């Protein structure tokens, strides 16, 4: 990435180049707009529930449970659930959980992954052995089994689930950061910095980190999508976010009993997860292309 | 090759040890007391009796000692007795594994039969309509949660159209493993099991095909006057398959992890469903044994993947 500035004399710098390439990509821009709207709706859940829908996520209306979606009043837009609670309001609050766990869970994962990956790659030795061992061990435990085990032994809420997912999901970022660091370590400018007496930590922070960062932003977007899927899956199984706190995943658990009465209770939360994750993945794809056009559409298996 | 296999197997030992430590420590960190749970339905057992039971099970000994003793039992396949079924855990697992295997292998087969041709199609029509459609489908399938997809399959094909059953392995009263009835019940779950592969395989296959189609020997084959179909099928497709073989370690991961969701949604009495029911009943020994089993299966699949790499590309044997 460092070589490019020489070839493009009109370059306005790496990040503004990226931004202008991104602006010319309609799919990614559309995904950003849609995701922005979803985040806005989740953040505004309190205001909307109070002033537009005039109900809370836990207000029951038992006689009207399973009512189909209708336009008669705002709280009925997505219908009512098994206990007569407004589905649309519950989805606003559920979105908060999904987006919170997705964003912060993957940020935790990325931080751990970067710290472990860069230091393991730079210092090598026993620390690298330990890091590689930890990565191969944790990646050998299927994520869903890991989460079931944790959910069984501990009572999870949004915060603890975020920490647990982050503590498991750092492997991908660590692997990539480690690989990048190993190849950067031997570059001339790093050797030069070492020669003039720069400390290892200074080199990692000032020379390695800025070069690993662009790829990590792409990894972050993929991780957000993966984390949202993991949270919804474990909550769907009933070992994640616990009712009455709504999450898109736990709104779908028990759905198997409502196929006939409430198909809308399956369709709306499921579509919300799909739309969110799709946007995040599309943004990740677009960012990868914008950050480095040479990577466009590349999908390598063995050549790593 | 023999030395490579031995070395790879030795490398797996620390990993297996790590898995054992994590499973053990998580169980012991848990705030709930297994002995209290075992006798939860028997109030006549006094606290003093519980304490003496705890002593006989060795739960008051130092943790490292408990760990060594536990590993010793695991090595002899003794995972204890289920709290709920009151039968050895290993028996319960063994009963369910064939059901999961049937589902997973059928899913893998369907994924390959659909995914690989789609990848070839995308590569041959690179940058044109079929390529775009396949890309969009694959990105979308990645974003759909598998439980939602399963619920949709049931909602449309079982509830609305009434083409498929809504779950379980056989109609009531029927007990057969290879018959039309089982096949009919397999369609839904197999479709779901195959989705991850159908989403991932075309992308890899496309990349491999594009790489190979630009090789010199493709031009040679064409200039020899071979028909395009022969060039693609015999020269490109078969060579592209080689690196794909190495992907199956990863595919096995998806099959192992996905089985819980698939079996829960379709009420399929396999290993995943057993774990789900056991976790709901707080039947710790089953969950612990199943997590160990699934993890060891993954370690094995990673070993097989690396052996496949080495078999395909002999340079790997010498490296590192």
Image: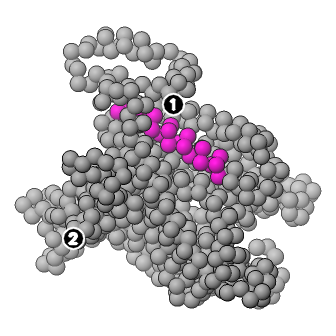
Whether the magenta-drawn stretch holds residue A239 is answered as no
Residue A235 appears in the figure: no
Q: Which residue is mark 1?
A: B24
Tell me: A257 left or right of B52.
left
Q: Which residues are magenta?
A: B283-305
Q: Are marks 2 and 1 on the same chain?
A: yes
Pinpoint the chain carrying mark 1. Answer: B
Q: Residue at x 77, y 46 (%)?
A: B1
Depth check: give the residue in front, B306 or A43. B306
Q: Residue A4 in the image: x percent, y percent?
A: 79, 79
| Quadrant where the N terminus of chain A is found in the figure | bottom right
Q: Tag 1 or tag 2, which sits nearer the N-term? A: 1
Depth check: give the residue in front, B67 or A162. B67
Depth check: give the residue in front, A194 or B72. B72
Q: Which mark is residue B160?
A: 2
Q: Secondary structure at mark 1?
A: helix
Q: Secondary structure at mark 2?
A: helix
Place residue A133 in its image quadrant. Answer: top right
| Quadrant where the C terminus of chain A is found in the figure | bottom right
Tell me: A67 left or right of B198.
left
Q: Residue at x 54, y 53 (%)?
A: B252
């Amino acid at each position: 990435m460092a070589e490019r500035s020489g070839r493009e004399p009109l370059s306005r710098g790496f990040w503004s180049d990226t931004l202008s390439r991104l602006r010319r990509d309609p799919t990614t821009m559309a995904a950003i707009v849609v995701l922005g709207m979803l985040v806005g709706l989740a953040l505004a859940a309190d205001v909307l529930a109070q002033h537009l829908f005039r109900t809370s996520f836990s207000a029951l209306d038992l006689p009207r449970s399973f009512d189909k979606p209708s336009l008669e009043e705002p709280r009925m837009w997505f219908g009512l659930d098994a206990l007569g609670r407004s589905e649309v309001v519950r989805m606003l609050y559920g979105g908060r959980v999904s987006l919170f766990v997705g964003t912060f869970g993957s940020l935790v994962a990325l931080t751990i992954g970067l710290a472990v990956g860069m230091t393991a790659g730079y210092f090598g030795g026993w620390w690298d052995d330990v890091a590689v061992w930890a990565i191969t061990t944790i990646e050998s435990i299927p994520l869903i089994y890991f989460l079931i085990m944790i959910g069984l032994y501990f009572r999870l809420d949004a915060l603890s689930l975020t920490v647990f997912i982050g503590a498991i999901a750092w492997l991908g970022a660590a692997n990539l950061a480690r690989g990048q660091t190993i190849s950067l370590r031997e570059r001339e400018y790093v050797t030069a910095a070492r020669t003039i007496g720069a400390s290892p930590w200074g080199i990692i922070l000032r020379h390695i980190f800025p070069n690993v960062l662009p790829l990590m932003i792409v990894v972050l977007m993929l991780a957000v999508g993966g984390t949202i899927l993991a949270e919804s899956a474990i909550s769907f199984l009933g070992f994640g976010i616990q009712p009455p706190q709504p999450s898109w995943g736990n709104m779908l658990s028990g759905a198997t009993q409502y196929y006939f009465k409430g198909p809308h209770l399956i369709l709306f939360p499921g579509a919300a997860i799909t739309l969110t994750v799709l946007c995040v993945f599309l943004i990740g794809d677009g960012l990868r292309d914008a950050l480095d056009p040479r990577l466009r559409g590349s999908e390598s298996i063995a050549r790593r | 090759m023999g030395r490579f296999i031995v070395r790879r197997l030795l490398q797996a030992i620390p990993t297996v040890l790590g898995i054992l430590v994590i499973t053990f420590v998580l169980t012991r960190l848990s705030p709930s007391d297994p002995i209290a749970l075992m006798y939860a339905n028997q109030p006549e057992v006094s606290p003093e009796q519980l304490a003496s039971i705890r002593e006989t099970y060795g739960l008051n000994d130092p943790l490292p000692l408990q760990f060594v003793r536990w590993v010793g039992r695991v090595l002899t396949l003794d995972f204890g007795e289920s709290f709920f079924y009151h039968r050895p855990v290993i028996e319960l697992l063994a009963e369910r594994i064939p059901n999961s295997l049937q589902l997973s292998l059928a899913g893998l087969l369907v994924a390959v039969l659909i995914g690989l041709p789609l990848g070839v199609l995308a590569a041959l029509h690179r940058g044109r309509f079929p390529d775009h459609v396949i890309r969009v489908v694959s990105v979308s399938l990645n974003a759909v949660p598998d439980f939602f997809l399963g619920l949709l399959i049931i909602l449309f094909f079982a509830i609305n159209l009434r083409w498929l059953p809504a779950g379980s392995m056989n109609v009531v009263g029927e007990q057969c493993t290879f018959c039309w009835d089982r096949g009919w019940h397999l369609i839904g779950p197999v479709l779901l099991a195959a989705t991850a592969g159908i989403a991932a395989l075309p992308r890899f296959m496309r990349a491999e095909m594009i790489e190979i189609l630009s090789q010199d020997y493709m031009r040679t084959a064409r200039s020899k006057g071979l028909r395009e179909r022969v060039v693609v099928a015999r020269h490109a497709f078969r060579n592209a398959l080689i690196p794909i073989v190495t992907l199956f370690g990863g595919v096995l991961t998806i099959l192992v992890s996905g089985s819980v969701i698939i079996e829960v949604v379709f009420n399929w009495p396999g290993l995943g469903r057993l774990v789900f029911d056991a976790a709901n009943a707080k039947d710790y020994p089953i969950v612990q044994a199943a997590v160990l089993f699934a993890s060891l299966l993954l370690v094995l699949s990673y070993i097989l993947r690396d052996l496949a790499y080495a078999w395909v590309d002999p340079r790997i044997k010498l490296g590192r």
